[in-house]
């Protein structure tokens, strides 16, 4: 009778311990580590010099000469270098999404831009 009770307690602990470690509505979610190959959000994109450089590179591929008002969001992906996925708000009110690859040698390559509706 002792073994089944110990087994039940072990299973109960295995189920409830991970639940206790998750964030609650009052508590921010714990920071997630950057995963190679996965996209990770950049919390303060305008403060990141690499994101600003990627945004400048993306602006060169847009079909007009509007100025950047702000970087609305940014994510990064570890590859052979770094991919940046950006949402940019321009001075004319338009929103654009852009993907920029920073190669290992530091060169920025814009792989796509698309106007958001």
Image: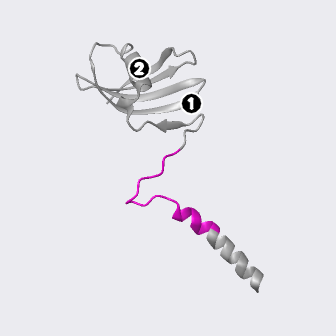
Q: Residue at coordinates 77% horizontally, 80% vertically from top-left?
A: 3
Q: Position of residue 24 (x, y in %)?
A: 43, 61
Image coordinates for residue 106, horizontal then vertical, percent: 52, 16
Outermost bottom residue:
1
* Mark 2 element type: helix
- Earlier-in-chain disc, 1 versus 2: 2
Indicate which disc residue 53 carries.
Answer: 2
Is label 1 in contact with label 2 (beta carbons under 8 Å)?
A: no
Quick one: SS at disc 1? strand
Residue numbers of the magenta segment: 14-32
Which residue is at a point 68% across and 72% down the rendered structure image? 10
User: Which residue position is annotated with label 1?
Assistant: 78
Q: Indicate the position of residue 40 as horizontal and vertical percent values.
A: 50, 38
Q: Main secondary structure of the magenta part?
A: loop
Q: In the rendered structure, does residue 78 fall within the stretch colored magenta?
A: no
Residue at 47% from the left image edge and 27% from the top image edge: 84
Image position of 116 with respect to 112: above or below: below
């Amino acid at each position: 009778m002792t073994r089944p009770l110990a087994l039940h307690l072990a299973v109960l602990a295995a189920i409830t311990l991970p639940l206790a470690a998750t964030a609650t509505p009052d508590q921010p979610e714990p920071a997630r580590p950057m995963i190679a190959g996965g996209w990770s959000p950049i919390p303060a994109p305008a403060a990141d010099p690499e994101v600003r450089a990627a945004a400048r590179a993306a602006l060169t591929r847009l079909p007009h000469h509007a100025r950047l008002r702000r970087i609305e969001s940014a994510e990064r992906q570890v590859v052979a270098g770094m991919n940046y996925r950006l949402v940019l708000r321009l001075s004319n009110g338009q929103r654009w999404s852009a993907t920029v690859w920073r190669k290992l040698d530091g060169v920025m390559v814009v792989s796509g831009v698309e106007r958001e509706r």
